Amino acid sequence: MKEIKYEVLKKGSLVKSVSIKNIKPCIATEGKVRVLMELDSPLGEVLPLLASNYPPGKTSYLEKKKILTLSLFNRLITIYPSGKVTMNKTLDKEDAIEVISQIMKDINQVYDHREEADSSEHLKSPSKLGPLDIHRCLPQTNCTDCGESTCMAFAFKILSGEQKLNNCIPLHEPWNQEQLKCLKKILGSTLMQNLGWEGY
């Protein structure tokens, strides 16, 4: 296959274009394809920050290899520090470009705000967070105000991106400041915001 280059974001601060290197049938889903792409810049420094841009249940970040896998748009998207990207369960090249365009916008946004990102050493990698980590920091009232039957169910939905932290009404109460501090300690302010915390 001949390489196809797309200028996606002409004013992108880090990534502007993507090249489709190869398209093959998807082994996981009949009638779909897997796509190998290459972004125009290396991404090593932004991948850990990009992982915090998505719900932890949708990411897997391998710190030693600096490889990020996202479970988004009903497919797996693996992003390598070199700028290589693989995507499965894709309809066609147009579908691949539509999805990678959104991710490229996210990459540029993270790159533009990298100085503001949490650099605390004590933050757990988002892909290593589990529902118990979140649950330990919730008020644990099982009030159902969020629409879930228990705080544990709410914690699972937070990780998968199906719920927002802001929906936990007791977290807004002044007597639950310790729970907020606990969440900020394990998530950091950036991930808390990305998980839907709007504050008081």
Image (cartoon, rainbow, N blue to C red):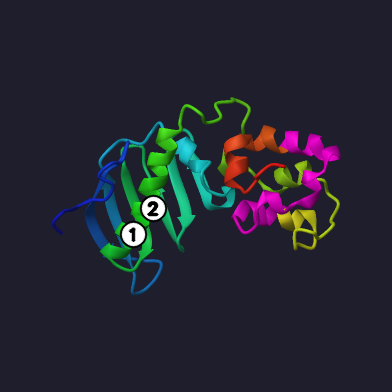
User: Please, which residue is most extreme toward the left here?
Assistant: 2
Of residues 52 and 3, which is closer to you in this image?
52
Q: Residues at badges 1 and 2 in contact (C-beta under 8 Å)?
A: yes
Look at the image and give the residue range highlighted in magenta: 155-182
Q: Which mark is residue 180?
A: none
User: Please, which residue is most extreme toward the front here?
Assistant: 200
Q: Amino acid at mark 2?
A: Gln
Residue 31 picture location, percent across and down: 33, 74
Residue 52 picture location, percent across and down: 53, 41
Q: Residue at x 81, y 48 (%)?
A: 170
Q: Is residue 24 left or right of residue 167?
A: left
Q: Which residue is mark 1?
A: 98
Q: Please identify the quarter of the rendering in which residue 151 is found.
A: bottom right
Q: Which residue is mark 2?
A: 102
> Callout 2 environment at 10 Å: few (<14), some (14 to 19), or many (20+)?
few
Q: Quadrant of the N terminus?
A: bottom left
